[in-house]
Amino acid sequence: MDDKFLNKNPQTFYTTDNIFSSSAQIDQAVLAIYSQLRDMWANPTEQGWTFVFRGNGTDMYDVPSIRRANTFNNYGTINPNRDEFYKNFSAWYTIIAKANLAIKSADLPNITWAKPADKAYTLAQARFFRAFAYRNLAELFGGVPIVKDVATAAKFNYARATRVETYQFAIDELLAIENDLPITTAQGGRLVRGAAQHNLCELYLAMGTQLAADGDAAGASKAFANSIDYGNKVIDGGTYALMKNRFGSRKTETQGNVYWDLFQENNVNYQDGNTECIWAIEIDYAAFKAEDPRSKLPYSRAYGPVFRNGSPKNLQGTLEDVGGRGIADIIPTLYTRDGIYQGVYANDMRNSEIVFRRTFLGNVPSSPYYGQPVPWSVLYDNQDDQSLDYPVSCKIATDKYTGLADGQDRSNLFRDDYFIRLPETILLRAEAKQRSGDKAGAAADVNLLRTRANCGYLVTAADMDDNFNTILDERSRELVYEECRWNTLLRMGGTIAVDRIRKYAFWPEAQATLTFNYNLWPIPQLVIDANKDVKLAQNPGWH
Amino acid sequence: MTVFFVFVFLPLFTFAQDRIAIKGVVRSETNAALSGVSVTVKGTSQGTTTDANGQFSLTVNKGVSLTVSHVGYETVEIVVDRANPAMEIKLFPATTALSDVVVIAYGTVQRKDFTGAVSSVKMENSPLALLPNMNALEALKGSVTGLNVGAVTSSGGQPSILIRGQRSISGSNDPLILLDGVVYLGSISDINPDDIASYDVLKDAVSVAAYGSRSANGVIAITTKKGKIGKPVVSFKTETGIQRWQRRPVMLKGADWINMVNDKNKYAAGSTNWLQAGELANLKAGNETVWLDKVTQTGITDNQQVSISGAAQNVNYYLSSSYDDEKGIVVGDKYKHVNVLGKVNTKVTSWFQLGADGAYSRRDYSGTAANVGSAEIMSPYGVLYRDNSGDLEKYPYTQSLVNPLWGVNDGTVKNVDVYNTFRLNSFAVVKAPWVDGLSYRVNFSTNFEKRQSGNFYFENYYIKEGAGIAGRYDPASVQSLLSNANGNIDNTSTTNYVLDNILAYSHRFGKHQIDATAVATRDNLRVEDLNATGSDFAANGNTSLGFYGLSKATVQKVVLNNTERSNVGYLARLNYSYDDKYYLTSSFRRDGASVFGADKRYANFAAAGVAWKISEESFLKDFKPLNYLKLKLSWGQNGNQGLSPYATLSQVQNAAAGDARYEFSDAQGKILYGLVQTTLGNPSLGWEKTTAINTGFESAWLGNRLFVDLDLYSSKTTDQIFVRTIPIMTGFSTQLASLGEVDNKGIELSIRTENIHTANFGWSSTVTFWKNSNKLKHLYGEDKNGDGKEDDDIANNFFIGKSLGAIYGFKQIGIVQTGDAAYIALTGAAPGAPKYADINNDGKIDANDRTILGYSKENFRLNFSNTVRYKNLELYVMVAGIFGGNGYYMKSNTAAYMTSGTGRFNDNTIAKPYWTTNNPSNTYPSAYFSGDGRFLGLQSQAFVRIQDAALSYNLNFPLLERNHITGAKVFFAAKNLATFTHWVGGDPETGTPVQNNTFPVASSYSLGLNVSF
């Protein structure tokens, strides 16, 4: 009688023991990963650590004068205790745990699948995400513990795999599921085979780079060859192609160009006819209004300039004429906004006024530039103002904000965005070619993008310098606000990351305080402390 | 043992009839007239109480005994055998209430016969009852050794309660509350402080062991008032007070603020170009807003209470009703409380007794309070009003920081938060007629609480931010915000019941006294929560129905959340005493709890205690300085559940109740819900068990002028449950886990003295001191690093052999100065950044340089209270302190040192002499230092405060008597008069830093009147 009285089971939620009863629920477990990754790319709640993941503190992005407190560029204060590292590290392991749960539950005896292919696809997505997480972890933190099973109890003796082993695990996973992913799908946003192949291209490149650094030239060269192969599969496989002509919802407008079209509403998904889109981040305004407040790109707000603070005598307000309601959580460095378009590189569709807007008409009646373009010499009158006033990419602002009638305030874009766009694959292949010694091939790949962008200057093998400056610059031009710059810089190894940070950081602190070298983020101190039974080695350079 | 003297002057004799009229006056030992004294004919319902002059009259049968009793005084009995018009009775103060009855588990016992550690506090007619406490437990603050009562910061708020230190790390540390002897599972806020007659705080294992599983955190027994034999007494109390913010921070103003912002952002000195248009206009016009003035007000408390009580031979009743109305210090913080209580207790026959009480309480916390935190950081030149008619500007400096008053009184938000609680307690006692001393008692107590809470955000709450958007407040703009309007209503019903079956046997033979008790108890608590939300009213067209229009919203959602827990317990207890000198208590209890997995559900708890009234022994009886001395020793086990229901399970969130949503391109607007495991369960968790030894004495000296009570205890708690930081590689950052063993040691000392004792003047003092220290003995029993010692757990701040609450980190040794070239080269730290010690001297500052910097735990508490009486005037003052020292009672307070690091470039702060090249401070970092993940800014929370003061005057003049008023008292009471501390920020006890949205701890002053007739 007492036992019955004491048996009180939860009535309003499930546990891992009783939730799974249908295959739809396995998909829900996978869906949770899509949702988390959208948060990590779009950063709808403006998390500081996510801005770091998205590039704050690299050669490309810094913070404005009004947010010096959020700097990730003062190495007097950056150490393994910083929360940003722990949160980044944690995010990937939560994804791995979610993937492991889906993988394990897919095989539960009580789950019925309509057809084997459904199960294979669901599993393929889960295993893709697991591999994707390990790729990111290995690029940012180096070799990490490989966890393949659902944790049913806490464990304190995880051991680090090497960076190569971690890359290899991700490669093996993707190879195993490559063919279970469909080539295309009707559900824009779902994973397709190209996403796995793109990641294989990157993983082989990353592994080859590490093998080369480890002195394994043969292994490296094999890896680079594999990278090129997987690049070829994506680039030349017939599914994807660079968009070279005007397309999509606004193609008939006189303003704009094809690069601009890539970032307009209803133009992002492959299903919209955009053959550059390999994997898209789905944003849905109707869902946003209903009950998914994180279905938005807060780019105008988070990435936009604050002219009203930086040049209040000439520019005020938060309308389209100043790029919307920017608060500049992070800002482009001078390198990103001006440096990469110097000299022969100026003539570039990606530097065109509609794509990278540099003309702002004074809107304060008392301004000497009222109705006239405010000169950059005025906007850049001191470094504080220069940090707040910068050109506006068409990727972060628009002339047609959705939601104004519903009280939206030009903070958010409601269009889809890219996890993977074909140009990144091309730049990965270019790098693999260059690392294989084929500088001409690398230049040709870079020129695929430059040709599409109607650039006045095409690069040559001579431009393909050994520090990969040309490729990194081209990445900045093509993939600004898209690529994960830390991944790129740290994946490349050597002193590329620290050299570029010292050279391009907006504020002087980086150069003054980056007195040591590193090419990996530190293992977060809390991870080392919590894993108490096995001491995880700290990455070199960190103290 | 009889330390009272009765002077009865009986000058007149009347034998003429059996019924005789008597008159008398009752005075205290100092000859002060005592009003409200109960004078009853022993064994009958007949009786009366004394009036304001201490006088009474009665007509009684010859030969009866009169019982004269008064709270705080020894009760006396007088045989009436002659009529006397001028009977004069003197009452003497009870000596530490030794003869008082204390509430123990499932019964009561005389204090002097009790083997455990218990502190009792009388509320009835005590100065403590005069203090403007809105919560029943606040009155205990500082009065009971070993009991830590926290600070209350909001209107109608509840203080935290901790008995004898922290036992449970993650589980509840709340003590078990007994209300009139029955486990009370409701909210303490529903008990009207004015209905309380006394508290008994049970602290040691033997006292609480009878509650086994529920008792590890101690037990507070609350006894409510009863009727007294005599004519019905009507009491009326009214009290009105004000509240103020004693230690309100002073934020920077004017040029100081501008300089600070420039310094922290490295702007050119004197620049103001970062000010927004509205701010510039205010700067130009010299308009500044002290935002803390705008969000605070003089709080007002109002309390009315009326009660009617009385008793006759076989029935006793107490009825009361009270009304509290509180307007807090923070604008918009409000509280209203209505409480009604009715108690009846009746002896149906000589062997059958029935009692019932019913209570109703309505607590209303509705209203939106202003945001203190944003008032502390807001630009002093920010725009408070958008127009001249006093309409608020939502964004005072056009950036995202919202006006701290937004939503408070502007009609943009509606908040509801109301609790309605019904309580029913009933009991029946049957004395077995065939066995003398055997009785059976059944208690049934049930509580039903219904809380309705919710917020409704009207469309105008969502006024757009930013300058340049014309007509933001125009009706058309506001209407376009209808899709943002949203609200929720949360209905929570909490039902609980407790059922006790108690079989008691009491027998005395010769010098032997036996009391045996057997109890079977069970209880159940069920919470049903239904939260309904609605958002987007664009399609509906307006929000004029507010909450009640949720069903008109385009998006509607319902979330249910139920929890239930049950407990069963079986107790056997035997108390034995010999010759009223030697006492033995022993008990055994078996408990089961639903919160654990099926195989961890039951546990057994045993306890035993002995006491020796050594002052009764012949060898001490003639030792004059000593009046009373009892030695006691107890041992016992008790348990704690340390868990909320279902916490051992691996929980999953899914569907709309979860937090994972996504959409795909093929179905616009269709939200797909993810499924996420949210916790890593741990089915191995079981009972937290504490085994404790308590020893001590209670004593009275020097003719009952000095009372010293001392308790020493030592306890061992095993399998404590806590939230453990685990490797994130599991996918989870924390898991509930249990750790080996924590040992607690403590000392509790209470000294009371009657310093001066004359007819017109009296002065008594009380000192209470208690100290608890703990030591982590075992953690997980692992030595993975093979150094022969058990491993620490750095990630969780647990260190073997050290106290809980360790603060582990980098030791700060000042501030980096311009000349510290080597340190700057080593660390990259800029001048003005905190400087850390290279503890292991390896030329690096890294994780190996961390050390224990201190402990969050306090060191000891010391309280000193005095009562001074002059004629009818009485003054009571308590000074209370919590002390640190030796690294104890430390807390990180970065806001006290750092100027930057808040996230916004222009956040205001308090004045700080921050580091500059011209002011090379070694304490305050530079204005632009914004944190490094290592800087803690440790500060001591230690403080001393004048906690309570009450001044009362007993009115005593003929006019009152003519109006049949038997007692009248006016009083002035104050709480938290002044605080002395080095803590920078808010109240030291709450450890609130500046720039924090925690409400202040109020200083309150009140004036009141008690009248009874």
Image (cartoon, rainbow, N blue to C red):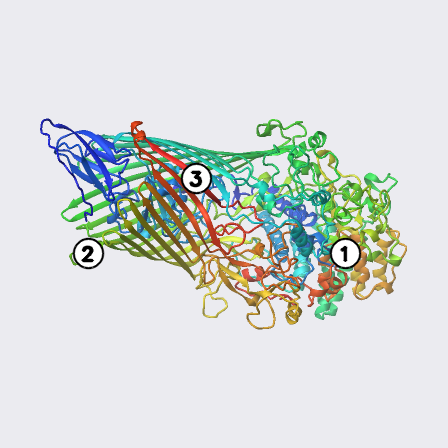
Residue matched to label 1? A383
Label 2 marks a residue whose chain is B
Please rate how many residues cluster around mark 3, counting C-alpha atoms within 10 Å: few if below 14, some from 14 to 19, many from 20: many
- On screen, residue B705 versus residue A448, left or right, reads left
Query: How far, Cα to Cα, is label 3 from label 1?
Result: 58 Å
Asked if residue A210 is positioned above or below residue B256 in the image, the reply reads: below
Residue B1006, numbered label: 3
Give yes or no for contact between labels 2 and 3 (Cβ–Cβ under 8 Å): no
Judge depth for marks 3 and 1 and give the one in front. Answer: 3
Amino acid at pointer 2 = Lys
Q: Earlier in the sequence, mark 2 or mark 3?
A: 2
Residue matched to label 2? B624
Q: Classify mark 1: helix, strand or loop.
A: helix
Amino acid at pointer 1 = Gln
- On screen, residue B881 versus residue B27, left or right, reads right
Query: How far, Cα to Cα, is label 2 from label 1?
Result: 87 Å
- On screen, residue B362 versus residue B98, left or right, reads right
